[in-house]
Every structure is written in structure tokens, then in C-alpha cells.
Amino acid sequence: MALKRHRPDEIITKFRQVEVPRGQGVAMADAVRQLGVSELTFYRWRKEYGGMSRDQLRQMKELQEKNERLRKAVADLTLDKLILSEAARGNF
């Protein structure tokens, strides 16, 4: 059986879906099982995405992508600098 990967926006929706049964007095384990995920998975999601809105999640993803691009740019520039310093010394 293939594992299903949930998108972050789906995860936030599932947090909202758990609140309804919890408000009706259903135990946390039963409310989470109704979603079709394990209790451990739910707590892992809550640790990572707990308290976030969809807008905050979108901003976080955009910042992560921007950070990744900047890291690649710094790595490329560092490599260029090392190559130029070797060439300047005449050790090529």
C-alpha cells in the first residue's frame, strides 16, 4: 500500500477537523483516527505546523525557497572566489 503524503495546507485543514469532535467530547485518539492518520503523525504535524494559518504557511514556504536560492548563490560565489584566488597565485 502506497503512503499518502499530505500537503501542508491539507494538514492545517485536518487540524480544524479535529477540533469539531474534540469539542463534542471525543477523545483525542479517536478524533485523530477519524481523519485517517495515526496519533503520532498528528502530534508530529502539530509540532511543525501548530498554530499556523494558511497565510503564515505560504509565507514560510516562500521564505524557505528564497533562503535556498540565496544559499546556492553564496556557494557559487565562494567557489568562484576560491578558483580566482588559486589562479592569482599561479598554482593551476
Image: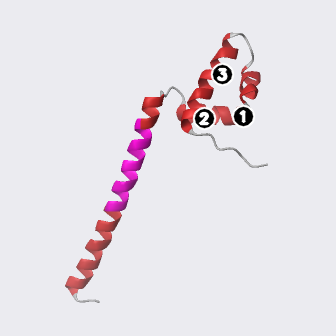
Nearer the N terminus, badge 1 or badge 2? 1
| Residue at which label 2 appears | 45
- Cα gap from disc 1 to disc 2, whole angstroms: 11 Å
Q: In the rendering, which numbered label is found on residue 54?
A: none
Q: Position of residue 56 (x, y in %)?
A: 43, 31
**Tag 1: amino acid:** Val
| Residue at which label 3 appears | 18
User: Local crowd at mark 1 within 10 Å, few (<14), some, or many (≥20)?
Assistant: some
**Tag 3: amino acid:** Val
- Cα gap from disc 3 to disc 1, whole angstroms: 11 Å
Which element carries disc 3, helix, strand or loop? helix
Look at the picture and state if 16 lies above or below 9: above
Q: Is residue 68 left or right of residue 74?
A: right
**Disc 1 versus disc 2: nearer the observer:** 1
Q: Are marks 1 and 2 in contact (CB under 8 Å)?
A: yes
Look at the picture and state if 86 lies above or below 39: below
**Tag 2: amino acid:** Trp
